[in-house]
Amino acid sequence: MAEPTLPVCLEVRQLSYRYPHFALQAVNFSLRRGELLAIIGPNASGKSTLLKLLAGLLLPEAGAVLIDGRPVGGLDLRERARRIAVVQQESPLLFPIRVLPFVLQGRHAYLRALGFETETDLEVARQALVATRTGHLAERPVQELSGGEKQRVLLARALAQEPELLLLDEPTLHLDIGFQVELLQLVQQLAPREGYAVALVSHELNLAAEFADSVLLLQQGRPLRLGPPAEVLERELLEQVFETELEVLIQPETGRPRVVLRAAPDAPEKGGSATS
Amino acid sequence: MTTVLSWKQVVRVCGLLAGALLILAFIALAVGAASLPLSAVGSALWEALTGSPSALSPEHRTILLFVRLPRILLAMIVGAALGVAGAGYQALLRNPLADPYVLGVSSGAALGAILSLVLAGRFPVTMPIAAFLGATLTIAGVYFLGQRGAELSPYTLLLAGVITASFLSAVITFLLNFLSGHDLRGMAFWLMGDLSSPAPIPLGWLALGVFVAVAAIYAVAGPLNLLLSGETEAEALGVNVRQTKLVVYLAASLATGLAVSVSGAIGYVGLLVPHLVRMLFGSDYRLLIPATALSGAVVLLAADTLARTIVAPTELPVGAVTAVVGAPVFIYLLRSRVSGRLPGPGGGGGGA
């Protein structure tokens, strides 16, 4: 849980963006350092668009994304990369590269033009490897890693940017349940310790419930509810948004909700992909 | 750790390659249709490097300093230009099989050069400029043809390049009829890629132009490394993607245009050399670019030395030598692990 005294890192005001057939409308929230926000919603609800806007990879049509009070769009590219790190769906790599040089790519925005990585850069990269428990992979080619290892190495590259804001786009996609939990535990531990604010997009409602400080639920580009997991993950709301029969249980130890399918005995289960 | 690149390693590798280039230049000076004593070659090299006169006989001086040496320098400059152009296009188009010749860019540059000969034959200065324009227009066209939807499809791109090259060669053959005053066998050689005719522009200017192109690509070597992991990733890591791509696009086209305007369409150097360097020294562009420039010089000088000695006293066009080696390697790369990493049609990359 974040200390309430930590400063606000990210502030989003009346943020809107429009595609020809889709619009993201009037999103508002703020995020303190050390806090973890989960952005959830059905397919095509605008989650990834919102994340791109937070990253500065898209510019808002209206409203503002402020990082430490300054509009993200106004930062120059290198400064933006020193403040915001994004872990995206991976692209295929063109040529072989080993893990350590790959993680050092996160230091690009700190290098001078034509520069080579300094001892400091190496140290930061090694710490990022240690933090993501991938130190033993440093000399391995990235192409040969398993899905879980690759995801942790992508996280390490983002950590090497020493960001204030860490953005994760479905970081647990393609990971088995063990790796999903491990990755989010890692992020949850690192965020307050290193002072990042974290925003992640996920389809895994229970991971959001378990690890997020706050949850933002989107539907068709509109923010439906924002708050602690127990306030957002309510049965009626989720059933309406995901159009499937669900049950929400509150865990007595943590007070956090848990979403399960309520299989109707007489009807075949519909969808179900929205929950883990 | 050994996998992290330092400037010391760049200096070490480049020193090694420069040494190899010097030794090869010595050998290339020594061999040829006329056999010369090694001492004369040594004196000539000394004279060329230091500028102080030596005890060379006039005919040896003519052969060494005014026939072989300019050709050797030309081979080095052209080899460096083609190698770096290939490495640049591979990163720009995210395609490991990109090469100025395979993509049709060399043919575009050749067409530009021929057009300038037809229209403004009395002004040889226009030739490299026309070749550069031909190169930039061709790569833009091939890029456009290689797109399927919003994505650049690697295989469609290569096909578009090959077809464009064949189309442009046909246009060139047609245009050659208007150049009956010129030596047609020489022109045919030039089309295959040939270093035997003297450069239409001074070597110094050629070297300067190629140096500018190589330096421009080297200046964005760091961003290029990141571009290899995807454009959105590179942008999120702080790379000005548009600016980087523009620099590489113009510089690689300049290098190709200059090379083609003095030597015709020599194939596969831009494909072979960067892959060879990657195998030996890794794929970091901060090392790859200078090492490819030097290795390109080594490879083309070796190929040209072969071209003018294996069937002496006649000569082969050097493009025939590079194609004999390059085409099989292209097929090998196409079928090997390199193309295994190419995203398939419609695959790869993110949506909106």
Image (spheres, rainbow, N blue to C red):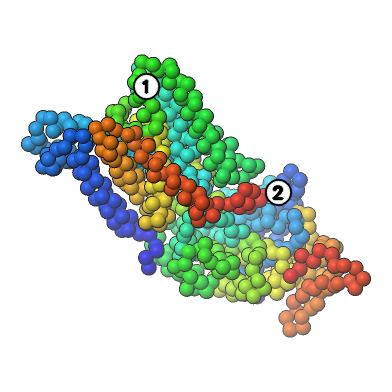
Against B312, residue B331 (above or below) is below
Quadrant in the picture for residue B86: top left
Under mark 1, the amino acid is Leu
- The residue under the point 32% across, 26% down is B200
Under mark 2, the amino acid is Tyr
Numbered label tally: 2
Q: Mark 1 highlights which residue?
A: B184
Q: Is residue B40 visible?
A: yes
Alpha carbon distance from label 2 to label 1: 62 Å
Asked whether B195 or B6 is in front, the reply is: B195
Where in the figure is residue B45, as x and y percent of width and height? 16, 41
Kindly identify which chain the residue marked by label 1 belongs to.
B
Against B76, residue B181 (above or below) is above
Asked whether B282 or B301 is in front, the reply is: B301
Q: Residues within 10 Å of mark 2 (few under 14, many from 20)?
A: many
Q: Which part of the image, by quadrant, shows the N terminus of chain A? A: bottom right
- Frontmost of labels 2 and 1 is 1
Q: Mark 2 highlights which residue?
A: A17
Give left or right: position of A126 versus A217.
left
Looking at this view, name the residue that lies furthest to the bottom. Answer: A253
Where in the figure is residue B40, as x and y percent of width and height? 12, 39
